[in-house]
């Protein structure tokens, strides 16, 4: 397995996900706004686009579905329109140990995303970007595996210890090494609520999560989306 930097417990944070398929978005927003932690909006809602990367053997996917405690994820993220000029793309590597997660981010060279995008397009972006050698070694082993997009709302608790996001309008697109026309698309009515906080306030987290009437889930957008196109992969 490729080498990522060692997991750093000092910078790790908890990430707890709750999946809702029954409640309306307005109901979820009201629950969050009426929460005892006094969540308030901190950013305007914005669309998030992700290209998930994986090995040829789909190691990241299988580590996740097998329930492995140590998991990795690699993706390219940008905000706003799905297609067109991408001015500030970011490469992200995420590592997880149980419920704790680390993230490393690297700015990529701007690019144009559209139907002519391919695995070779990615390699050209990587060649033009200023990246550490270890990152280039990892990227040489990865290929595009999934494209997804959703609208995210951002909230922060009154004490500033807990960040909460609401993701909706989820859509997934098949993507591979060849030129992609993104004709194969799935949408999901699920709404994903995610609570994030630093490890040093974990003792306060129970009171916050207990006041959220949602089902705790290990849901992964990458896994869920990949299985829409490959239903027998797991």
Image (cartoon, helix red, strand yellow):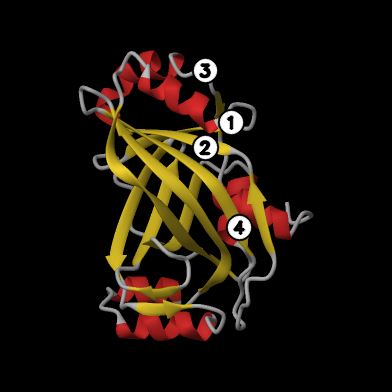
Query: Where residue 9 sits in the image (x, y, percent)?
Result: 29, 40
Find residue 172 and name its label: 4
Say if residue 32 shows up in the picture.
yes
Q: Are the residues at dot 2 and dot 1 in contact (C-beta closer than 8 Å)?
A: yes
| Mark 2 or mark 4: whose residue is earlier in sequence | 4
Hey, which quadrant is residue 189 in on the image?
Answer: top right
**CA gap, disc 2 and disc 4:** 15 Å
Which of the 4 image quadrants contains residue 67? top right
| N-terminal-most mark, 2 or 3 | 2
Q: What element carries label 1?
A: strand
Q: Residue furthest front?
A: 26
The numbered disc on residue 192 is 2
Whole-angstrom CA distance, mark 2 to mark 1, is 6 Å
- Could you tell me how far apart the alpha carbons at marks 4 and 3 are, in whole angstroms? 27 Å
How far apart marks 1 and 3 lie (CA) works out to 10 Å
Residue 58 location (% of width, % of height): 62, 63
The residue to which callout 3 is attached is: 213
Which residue is the site of mark 1? 20
């Amino acid at each position: 397995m490729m080498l990522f930097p060692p997991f750093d417990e000092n910078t790790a944070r908890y990430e707890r996900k709750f999946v809702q398929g029954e409640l309306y978005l307005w109901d979820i927003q009201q629950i969050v706004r009426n929460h005892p932690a006094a969540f308030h909006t901190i950013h305007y809602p914005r669309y998030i686009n992700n290209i998930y990367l994986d090995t040829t053997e789909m190691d990241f996917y299988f580590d996740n579905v097998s329930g492995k405690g140590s998991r990795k994820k690699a993706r390219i993220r940008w905000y706003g329109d799905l297609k067109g000029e991408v001015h500030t793309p970011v490469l992200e590597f995420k590592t997880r140990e149980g419920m704790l997660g680390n993230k490393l981010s690297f700015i990529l060279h701007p690019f144009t995303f559209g139907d002519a995008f391919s695995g070779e397009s990615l390699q050209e972006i990587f060649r033009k970007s200023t990246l550490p050698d270890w990152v280039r070694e990892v990227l040489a082993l990865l290929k595009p595996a999934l494209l997804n997009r959703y609208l995210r709302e951002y909230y922060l608790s009154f004490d500033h210890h807990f960040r909460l996001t609401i993701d909706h309008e989820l859509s997934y697109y098949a993507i591979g090494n060849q030129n992609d026309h993104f004709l194969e698309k799935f949408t999901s009515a699920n709404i994903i609520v995610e609570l994030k906080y630093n490890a040093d306030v974990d003792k306060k987290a129970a009171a916050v999560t207990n006041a959220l009437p949602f089902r705790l889930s290990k849901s992964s957008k990458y896994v869920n989306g990949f299985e829409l196109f490959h239903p027998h992969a797991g």
